[in-house]
Image (spheres, rainbow, N blue to C red):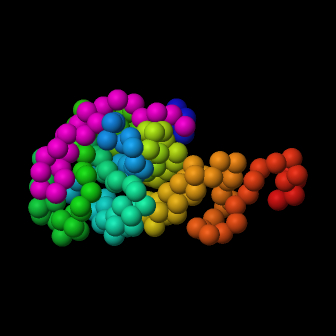
Amino acid sequence: MALIGTQVLPFTANAFHNGEFITVSEENFKGKWSVVVFYPADFTFVCPTELEDMQNQYATLKEMGAEVYSVSTDTHFTHKAWHDHSEAIGKIEYIMIGDPSQKISRNFDVLNEEDGLAERGTFIIDPDGVIQTVEINAGGIGRDASQVVSKLKAAQYVRNNPGEVCPAKWKEGEATLKPSLDLVGKI
């Protein structure tokens, strides 16, 4: 399924956030930028390194107007237990969604049906609830949250500057491209 440019499908789930249980739905992804990070399971090996790295970028992402949501097929209760017992996960300030029904993982097409676990999927969603970027890694390959920051900057630039696109390795403040007949074959 090609998810780029599609609306996030409806869901409702329980989550752990700042010492409390809350309810989250696709409506939470509207009105601001959202970063949704799927991972296989709590109390594992690569996952805490990724989630801690995302926490290290959280303040920057918040300054950019984005909220972060992590999602696994564990329950919100398991998220709380992991938060309470792991030094790395105990730092997390963003929302940790439980997906024991696997509905959200299926909606985002990251569910490994055989294992019943989510793959390592990262999604950037615009304020209209439309998916703008998708990255899915194999289980043994951890992600770099600083790349999410770069992709979010590019997605925000393109949204705010219709008719312009960001070339490879684009950094904020660098030149962009304006697709036109004059550029065909000249790049």
- Is 142 placed above or below 37 here? below
Q: Horizontal and vertical percent for residue 61?
A: 39, 62
In this picture, residue 23 sits left or right of residue 142: left
The residue under the point 30% across, 47% down is: 71
Identify the residue at the far top of this view. 10
Q: Residue 52 appears in which quarter of the rendering?
A: bottom left
Dividing the image into 4 quarters, which one contains the C terminus? bottom right
Query: How many numbered marks have been drawn onto this rendered protein structure?
Result: 0
Magenta segment: does it hold 145? Answer: no
- Is 15 placed above or below 92 here? above
Tell me if residue 177 can be seen: yes
Q: Horizontal and vertical percent for residue 170?
A: 63, 65
Q: Horizontal and vertical percent for residue 29?
A: 36, 42
Q: Residue 142 appears in which quarter of the rendering?
A: bottom left
In this picture, residue 168 sits left or right of residue 154: right
Q: Which of 33 and 12 is in front in this view?
A: 33
The residue under the point 49% across, 41% down is: 131
Q: Horizontal and vertical percent for residue 185?
A: 88, 53
The region drawn magenta spans 5-25
- Is 42 placed above or below 98 here? below
Q: Residue 171 appears in which quarter of the rendering?
A: bottom right
The residue under the point 40% across, 48% down is: 32
